[in-house]
Image: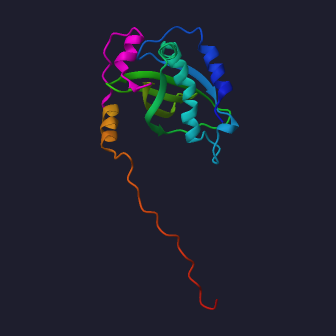
Amino acid sequence: MYPLLRMAKELWISRNLPPLAPGETHVSHHLCWPWDLDLWKELNNGRTLTLYDLGRIPLARRSGMVAVLKREGWGLTMAGAVVRYRRRVRAFERFEMRSRLIGWDAKFMYLEQSMWKRDGECANHAVYRSAATGRTGIVPPDRLMQALGIEADSPPLPDWVRDWLDAESRRPWPPMQTEVPAPRTRIAQAGE
């Protein structure tokens, strides 16, 4: 289930925080609840991606993006992500989330997010490729930035992000369909 109450809480907490410029970090604090866990009693990897919304949406609001999206009738979508998991987050463990826009190109915006444990260790780290969308498809980020009153060019994307994007450009789409093997039949044992 989507964490609607947690999102409402984050939007309430962040409502009076100062605006953020591209590259500035939105910091939020969270608790891992039992319903966030997987069978191994740690934060579920899919739930991690859902919880990252709790940082991205307030970031978009603080940057003025939510107001622009509403005014223009645009939406916001995710077009890809790369995630690295390194430390377990257990039930009732508190963690800090850091979210920021790291740059954009002709088609997409790139957002970096991470979860940090109380001992200062990074539990996981994600980079999202995101796009504003309108009636005719993707809204160029330069147009979105202009609507936000930002005249600057994108900061250079880190080399490792560009390497990820290069690898993504070579990834086949749609994915190749593989043949599904026929189910194995049981071989009768001697004496049956």
Quadrant (top left, top right, bottom left, bottom right) of the N terminus: top right
173 or 170, which is in the foreground?
173
Q: Quadrant of residue 171?
A: top left
The residue located at (55%, 19%) in the rendering is 58
Residues drawn in magenta: 135-159
Q: Quick check: 31 above or below 59?
A: below
Q: Please tell me whether residue 26 belongs to the stretch shown in magenta.
A: no
191 or 78, which is in the foreground?
78
Seen from this angle, which residue lies furthest front?
Answer: 135
Q: Residue 104: x percent and y percent?
A: 35, 23
Q: Please tell me whether residue 141 belongs to the stretch shown in magenta.
A: yes
The residue located at (65%, 44%) in the rendering is 41
Q: Quick check: 169 above or below 130?
A: below
Q: Quadrant of residue 95?
A: top right
Q: Quick check: 170 above or below 4?
A: below
Seen from this angle, which residue lies furthest bottom?
Answer: 191
Q: Residue 84: x percent and y percent?
A: 46, 38
153 left or right of 111?
left
